[in-house]
Amino acid sequence: MSKIGLKDLLGIDFPVIVAPMFLVSNTKMVLAAIESGATGAIPALNYRTTEELIAAIREIKSKTNKPFGINLIVNKSNIFFKKQLDVVCNEGVDFVITSLGSPEETINECHKHGVKVFCDVTDLKFAKKVEALGCDAIIAVNKEAGGHAGNISYKDLIPLLVENCSTPIISAGGVTTGQDIKKMLDMGVAGVSMGSVFIATDECDVTQEYKQACIDYGAKDIVMTTKLSGTPCTVINTPYVKSIGTEQGWLEKLLNRNKKLKKWVKAFVFSKGMKQLQKSAFSATYKTVWCAGPSIERVKEIRSIKTIFTELKQEFESVK
Protein backbone atom coordinates (compact mmCIF):
# COMPACT_ATOMS: atom_id res chain seq x y z
CA MET A 1 0.00 0.00 0.00
CA SER A 2 1.28 3.45 -0.95
CA LYS A 3 0.87 6.39 1.39
CA ILE A 4 1.38 8.88 -1.45
CA GLY A 5 -1.77 10.87 -2.21
CA LEU A 6 -2.91 12.57 -5.40
CA LYS A 7 -2.13 15.86 -3.68
CA ASP A 8 1.50 14.73 -3.33
CA LEU A 9 1.68 13.26 -6.84
CA LEU A 10 0.42 16.41 -8.58
CA GLY A 11 0.58 19.18 -6.01
CA ILE A 12 -3.17 19.85 -6.08
CA ASP A 13 -5.41 20.87 -3.17
CA PHE A 14 -8.37 18.52 -3.67
CA PRO A 15 -7.69 14.88 -4.67
CA VAL A 16 -9.98 14.72 -7.71
CA ILE A 17 -9.35 14.28 -11.43
CA VAL A 18 -12.19 15.38 -13.70
CA ALA A 19 -12.04 12.24 -15.83
CA PRO A 20 -11.22 12.32 -19.53
CA MET A 21 -14.51 11.74 -21.36
CA PHE A 22 -14.60 11.08 -25.09
CA LEU A 23 -16.10 14.08 -26.94
CA VAL A 24 -17.19 15.61 -23.62
CA SER A 25 -14.01 16.92 -21.96
CA ASN A 26 -12.59 20.24 -23.12
CA THR A 27 -10.15 22.94 -22.05
CA LYS A 28 -12.84 24.96 -20.23
CA MET A 29 -13.70 21.97 -18.04
CA VAL A 30 -10.06 21.30 -17.19
CA LEU A 31 -9.43 24.95 -16.33
CA ALA A 32 -12.55 25.06 -14.14
CA ALA A 33 -11.36 21.95 -12.30
CA ILE A 34 -7.93 23.50 -11.79
CA GLU A 35 -9.48 26.74 -10.48
CA SER A 36 -11.36 24.60 -7.94
CA GLY A 37 -8.13 23.08 -6.64
CA ALA A 38 -8.50 19.78 -8.49
CA THR A 39 -7.29 18.76 -11.95
CA GLY A 40 -8.60 17.25 -15.16
CA ALA A 41 -7.66 15.38 -18.30
CA ILE A 42 -8.83 15.36 -21.92
CA PRO A 43 -8.79 12.41 -24.35
CA ALA A 44 -6.32 13.09 -27.15
CA LEU A 45 -8.94 11.66 -29.51
CA ASN A 46 -11.21 14.62 -28.77
CA TYR A 47 -9.05 16.45 -31.31
CA ARG A 48 -9.06 15.51 -34.99
CA THR A 49 -5.48 16.55 -35.63
CA THR A 50 -2.25 16.75 -33.66
CA GLU A 51 -2.25 20.51 -34.37
CA GLU A 52 -5.58 20.85 -32.55
CA LEU A 53 -4.25 18.78 -29.65
CA ILE A 54 -1.15 20.98 -29.42
CA ALA A 55 -3.32 24.11 -29.51
CA ALA A 56 -5.49 22.81 -26.65
CA ILE A 57 -2.48 21.98 -24.47
CA ARG A 58 -0.94 25.38 -25.13
CA GLU A 59 -4.24 27.13 -24.39
CA ILE A 60 -4.39 25.54 -20.93
CA LYS A 61 -0.71 26.29 -20.28
CA SER A 62 -1.24 29.93 -21.25
CA LYS A 63 -3.88 30.29 -18.53
CA THR A 64 -2.43 28.24 -15.66
CA ASN A 65 0.77 26.63 -14.42
CA LYS A 66 -1.20 24.02 -12.49
CA PRO A 67 -1.09 20.32 -13.50
CA PHE A 68 -3.39 18.69 -16.07
CA GLY A 69 -3.34 15.56 -18.19
CA ILE A 70 -4.11 13.93 -21.52
CA ASN A 71 -5.68 10.49 -21.99
CA LEU A 72 -4.22 8.16 -24.63
CA ILE A 73 -5.85 5.06 -26.08
CA VAL A 74 -2.76 2.87 -26.39
CA ASN A 75 -4.03 -0.13 -28.33
CA LYS A 76 -4.10 -0.66 -32.11
CA SER A 77 -7.58 0.84 -32.50
CA ASN A 78 -5.95 4.28 -32.10
CA ILE A 79 -4.05 4.87 -35.34
CA PHE A 80 -2.94 8.30 -34.06
CA PHE A 81 -1.26 6.94 -30.92
CA LYS A 82 2.38 7.54 -31.97
CA LYS A 83 1.79 11.15 -32.97
CA GLN A 84 -0.25 11.85 -29.83
CA LEU A 85 2.47 10.35 -27.64
CA ASP A 86 5.03 12.62 -29.30
CA VAL A 87 2.81 15.64 -28.62
CA VAL A 88 2.27 14.98 -24.91
CA CYS A 89 5.99 14.39 -24.44
CA ASN A 90 7.15 17.40 -26.45
CA GLU A 91 4.52 19.77 -25.01
CA GLY A 92 5.23 18.54 -21.49
CA VAL A 93 1.83 17.80 -19.98
CA ASP A 94 1.96 16.82 -16.32
CA PHE A 95 0.45 13.36 -16.61
CA VAL A 96 -0.91 10.90 -19.14
CA ILE A 97 -3.73 8.44 -18.49
CA THR A 98 -3.45 5.27 -20.56
CA SER A 99 -6.46 3.17 -21.57
CA LEU A 100 -7.22 -0.03 -23.48
CA GLY A 101 -3.80 -1.54 -24.08
CA SER A 102 -0.23 -2.02 -22.90
CA PRO A 103 1.24 1.23 -21.53
CA GLU A 104 4.87 0.11 -21.80
CA GLU A 105 5.90 2.41 -24.65
CA THR A 106 3.99 5.32 -23.14
CA ILE A 107 5.64 4.89 -19.74
CA ASN A 108 9.12 4.65 -21.26
CA GLU A 109 8.74 7.71 -23.48
CA CYS A 110 6.87 9.88 -21.00
CA HIS A 111 9.36 9.25 -18.22
CA LYS A 112 12.17 10.45 -20.50
CA HIS A 113 10.34 13.81 -20.61
CA GLY A 114 9.32 13.97 -16.93
CA VAL A 115 5.66 13.17 -17.65
CA LYS A 116 3.88 10.96 -15.11
CA VAL A 117 1.79 8.02 -16.35
CA PHE A 118 -1.40 6.79 -14.69
CA CYS A 119 -2.75 3.49 -16.06
CA ASP A 120 -6.36 2.34 -16.23
CA VAL A 121 -6.79 -1.23 -14.96
CA THR A 122 -9.81 -3.37 -14.14
CA ASP A 123 -8.25 -6.16 -12.09
CA LEU A 124 -5.22 -7.13 -10.00
CA LYS A 125 -3.45 -8.98 -12.81
CA PHE A 126 -3.18 -5.87 -14.97
CA ALA A 127 -2.46 -3.69 -11.96
CA LYS A 128 0.62 -5.80 -11.21
CA LYS A 129 1.66 -5.65 -14.87
CA VAL A 130 1.56 -1.85 -15.10
CA GLU A 131 3.22 -1.54 -11.69
CA ALA A 132 6.07 -3.73 -12.96
CA LEU A 133 6.37 -1.43 -15.98
CA GLY A 134 6.92 1.53 -13.65
CA CYS A 135 3.68 3.53 -13.85
CA ASP A 136 3.25 6.41 -11.40
CA ALA A 137 -0.31 5.54 -10.37
CA ILE A 138 -2.90 2.87 -11.03
CA ILE A 139 -6.45 3.94 -11.90
CA ALA A 140 -8.85 1.30 -10.58
CA VAL A 141 -11.68 1.34 -13.11
CA ASN A 142 -14.46 -0.45 -11.29
CA LYS A 143 -17.95 -1.70 -12.09
CA GLU A 144 -19.50 1.59 -11.01
CA ALA A 145 -17.49 3.68 -13.50
CA GLY A 146 -18.83 5.36 -16.62
CA GLY A 147 -17.47 4.76 -20.12
CA HIS A 148 -15.24 1.69 -20.37
CA ALA A 149 -16.15 0.32 -16.95
CA GLY A 150 -14.69 -2.71 -15.21
CA ASN A 151 -16.53 -5.78 -13.97
CA ILE A 152 -15.49 -5.71 -10.30
CA SER A 153 -17.22 -3.45 -7.76
CA TYR A 154 -15.08 -0.83 -6.03
CA LYS A 155 -15.97 -2.58 -2.75
CA ASP A 156 -13.85 -5.53 -3.86
CA LEU A 157 -11.40 -3.96 -6.33
CA ILE A 158 -10.08 -1.12 -4.17
CA PRO A 159 -9.09 -3.26 -1.13
CA LEU A 160 -7.55 -5.85 -3.47
CA LEU A 161 -5.32 -3.31 -5.22
CA VAL A 162 -4.48 -1.31 -2.10
CA GLU A 163 -3.36 -4.45 -0.28
CA ASN A 164 -1.32 -5.92 -3.15
CA CYS A 165 0.20 -2.88 -4.88
CA SER A 166 2.81 -0.41 -3.66
CA THR A 167 1.91 2.12 -6.38
CA PRO A 168 -0.72 4.80 -5.54
CA ILE A 169 -4.29 3.80 -6.45
CA ILE A 170 -6.83 6.22 -7.93
CA SER A 171 -10.46 5.07 -7.86
CA ALA A 172 -12.62 5.56 -10.97
CA GLY A 173 -16.29 4.83 -10.36
CA GLY A 174 -18.60 4.74 -7.38
CA VAL A 175 -18.09 8.40 -6.46
CA THR A 176 -20.88 10.95 -6.63
CA THR A 177 -20.52 12.98 -3.41
CA GLY A 178 -17.88 14.48 -1.16
CA GLN A 179 -18.71 11.79 1.37
CA ASP A 180 -17.87 9.19 -1.30
CA ILE A 181 -14.48 10.84 -1.87
CA LYS A 182 -13.73 10.67 1.85
CA LYS A 183 -14.85 7.03 1.95
CA MET A 184 -12.49 6.15 -0.91
CA LEU A 185 -9.56 7.90 0.78
CA ASP A 186 -10.31 5.99 3.97
CA MET A 187 -10.12 2.78 1.90
CA GLY A 188 -6.54 3.71 1.03
CA VAL A 189 -6.71 5.35 -2.40
CA ALA A 190 -4.63 8.37 -3.37
CA GLY A 191 -7.56 10.15 -4.97
CA VAL A 192 -10.54 9.70 -7.25
CA SER A 193 -11.48 10.21 -10.89
CA MET A 194 -15.00 11.55 -11.51
CA GLY A 195 -16.63 12.06 -14.90
CA SER A 196 -20.36 11.78 -15.54
CA VAL A 197 -21.42 14.36 -12.93
CA PHE A 198 -19.60 16.99 -15.00
CA ILE A 199 -21.43 16.39 -18.30
CA ALA A 200 -24.40 18.58 -17.41
CA THR A 201 -22.30 21.68 -16.73
CA ASP A 202 -22.03 25.18 -18.15
CA GLU A 203 -18.48 24.50 -19.35
CA CYS A 204 -19.36 21.34 -21.30
CA ASP A 205 -20.05 21.80 -25.03
CA VAL A 206 -22.35 18.83 -25.70
CA THR A 207 -25.98 19.36 -26.68
CA GLN A 208 -28.66 20.47 -24.23
CA GLU A 209 -30.40 17.17 -25.01
CA TYR A 210 -27.35 15.20 -23.77
CA LYS A 211 -27.19 17.31 -20.61
CA GLN A 212 -30.94 16.95 -20.07
CA ALA A 213 -30.64 13.16 -20.44
CA CYS A 214 -28.15 13.18 -17.54
CA ILE A 215 -30.81 14.98 -15.50
CA ASP A 216 -33.80 12.89 -16.60
CA TYR A 217 -32.19 9.44 -16.32
CA GLY A 218 -30.54 7.80 -13.31
CA ALA A 219 -28.26 4.96 -12.22
CA LYS A 220 -30.88 2.32 -13.04
CA ASP A 221 -30.91 3.53 -16.67
CA ILE A 222 -27.21 2.85 -17.32
CA VAL A 223 -26.48 -0.25 -19.42
CA MET A 224 -23.35 -1.82 -20.87
CA THR A 225 -22.91 -2.06 -24.65
CA THR A 226 -20.21 -3.62 -26.83
CA LYS A 227 -21.53 -1.99 -30.00
CA LEU A 228 -19.54 1.25 -29.71
CA SER A 229 -15.93 0.17 -29.30
CA GLY A 230 -15.91 -3.59 -29.01
CA THR A 231 -15.04 -3.11 -25.33
CA PRO A 232 -17.93 -2.89 -22.82
CA CYS A 233 -19.00 0.74 -22.47
CA THR A 234 -21.76 2.32 -20.37
CA VAL A 235 -24.55 4.29 -22.06
CA ILE A 236 -27.94 5.71 -21.13
CA ASN A 237 -30.67 3.20 -21.96
CA THR A 238 -32.74 5.48 -24.19
CA PRO A 239 -35.58 4.11 -26.36
CA TYR A 240 -33.14 4.04 -29.31
CA VAL A 241 -30.55 2.03 -27.37
CA LYS A 242 -33.30 -0.38 -26.35
CA SER A 243 -34.33 -0.79 -29.99
CA ILE A 244 -30.82 -1.58 -31.31
CA GLY A 245 -29.70 -3.73 -28.39
CA THR A 246 -26.34 -3.72 -26.61
CA GLU A 247 -24.58 -6.76 -28.07
CA GLN A 248 -22.41 -7.01 -31.19
CA GLY A 249 -23.92 -8.81 -34.18
CA TRP A 250 -23.07 -12.43 -35.01
CA LEU A 251 -20.66 -11.39 -37.80
CA GLU A 252 -18.62 -9.08 -35.55
CA LYS A 253 -18.44 -11.78 -32.87
CA LEU A 254 -17.31 -14.33 -35.46
CA LEU A 255 -14.63 -12.05 -36.89
CA ASN A 256 -13.38 -11.21 -33.40
CA ARG A 257 -12.52 -14.87 -32.90
CA ASN A 258 -10.12 -14.75 -35.87
CA LYS A 259 -6.66 -13.82 -34.53
CA LYS A 260 -5.51 -12.29 -37.83
CA LEU A 261 -8.65 -10.20 -38.31
CA LYS A 262 -9.41 -9.34 -34.69
CA LYS A 263 -7.36 -6.14 -34.43
CA TRP A 264 -8.77 -4.78 -37.69
CA VAL A 265 -12.34 -5.60 -36.72
CA LYS A 266 -11.80 -3.95 -33.34
CA ALA A 267 -10.38 -0.82 -35.02
CA PHE A 268 -13.37 -0.68 -37.40
CA VAL A 269 -15.93 -1.14 -34.62
CA PHE A 270 -14.13 1.48 -32.51
CA SER A 271 -14.07 4.01 -35.35
CA LYS A 272 -17.71 3.40 -36.25
CA GLY A 273 -18.83 3.62 -32.63
CA MET A 274 -16.90 6.80 -31.92
CA LYS A 275 -18.46 8.48 -34.97
CA GLN A 276 -21.88 7.53 -33.67
CA LEU A 277 -21.06 9.02 -30.26
CA GLN A 278 -19.82 12.19 -31.94
CA LYS A 279 -23.10 12.65 -33.78
CA SER A 280 -25.03 12.07 -30.57
CA ALA A 281 -22.92 14.47 -28.51
CA PHE A 282 -23.22 17.43 -30.84
CA SER A 283 -26.48 16.89 -32.77
CA ALA A 284 -29.61 15.37 -31.33
CA THR A 285 -31.47 12.86 -33.50
CA TYR A 286 -33.64 9.88 -32.76
CA LYS A 287 -30.51 7.76 -33.34
CA THR A 288 -28.84 9.00 -30.20
CA VAL A 289 -26.38 7.14 -27.97
CA TRP A 290 -25.22 9.03 -24.89
CA CYS A 291 -22.29 7.71 -22.88
CA ALA A 292 -22.59 8.19 -19.10
CA GLY A 293 -22.13 6.37 -15.81
CA PRO A 294 -24.31 5.64 -12.75
CA SER A 295 -23.24 8.87 -11.04
CA ILE A 296 -25.78 10.80 -13.17
CA GLU A 297 -28.12 9.75 -10.36
CA ARG A 298 -26.87 12.87 -8.57
CA VAL A 299 -27.44 15.25 -11.49
CA LYS A 300 -30.60 17.34 -11.03
CA GLU A 301 -29.76 20.50 -12.96
CA ILE A 302 -27.14 22.12 -15.19
CA ARG A 303 -24.58 23.86 -13.01
CA SER A 304 -21.06 25.27 -13.16
CA ILE A 305 -18.12 23.04 -12.34
CA LYS A 306 -17.14 25.51 -9.63
CA THR A 307 -20.54 25.06 -7.98
CA ILE A 308 -20.22 21.28 -8.07
CA PHE A 309 -16.75 21.40 -6.49
CA THR A 310 -17.93 23.79 -3.79
CA GLU A 311 -20.62 21.27 -2.89
CA LEU A 312 -18.20 18.32 -3.05
CA LYS A 313 -15.80 20.07 -0.68
CA GLN A 314 -18.58 20.95 1.77
CA GLU A 315 -19.73 17.33 1.79
CA PHE A 316 -16.16 16.13 2.17
CA GLU A 317 -15.55 18.40 5.16
CA SER A 318 -18.84 17.35 6.76
CA VAL A 319 -17.54 13.83 7.35
CA LYS A 320 -16.27 13.48 10.89
Image (tube, rainbow, N blue to C red):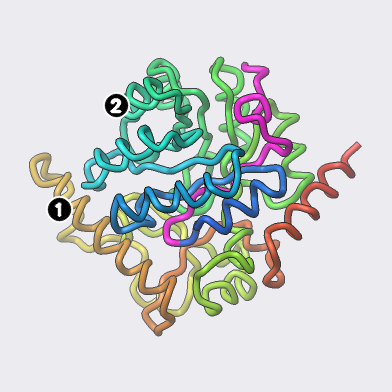
State how many labels appear: 2
Magenta segment, prevailing SS (helix, strand or loop): loop
Give the percent coordinates (x, y) of residue 93. 46, 36
Give the percent coordinates (x, y) of residue 174. 63, 46
Q: Quadrant of the C terminus?
A: top right
Q: Please, which residue is most extreme toward the front here?
A: 62
**Three-letter amino acid code of the residue under disc 1:** Leu
Which element is circle 2 on?
Answer: helix
**Three-letter amino acid code of the residue under disc 2:** Glu
Rate crowding at label 2 as few (under 14), some (14 to 19) or many (20 or more) other CA atoms within 10 Å. Answer: few
Q: Which residue is depicted at the point 21% across and 47% down?
A: 79
Q: Who is closer to the viewer here, 202 or 119?
A: 202
Residue position for label 2 = 105
Residue position for label 1 = 254
Give the percent coordinates (x, y) of residue 11. 66, 30
Q: Was residue 54 drawn as part of the magenta stretch in this picture?
A: no
Q: Which residues are magenta?
A: 1-23
- Above or below residue 73? Residue 281 is below
Which mark lies nearer to you, 2 or 1? 2
Q: Which residue is depicted at the point 40% across and 37% down?
A: 91
In the picture, measured across the screen, residue 71 lies left or right of residue 102, that is: right
- Above or below residue 107? Residue 297 is below
Mark 2 or 1, nearer chain start: 2
Q: Quadrant of the N terminus?
A: top right
Rate crowding at label 1 as few (under 14), some (14 to 19) or many (20 or more) other CA atoms within 10 Å. Answer: few
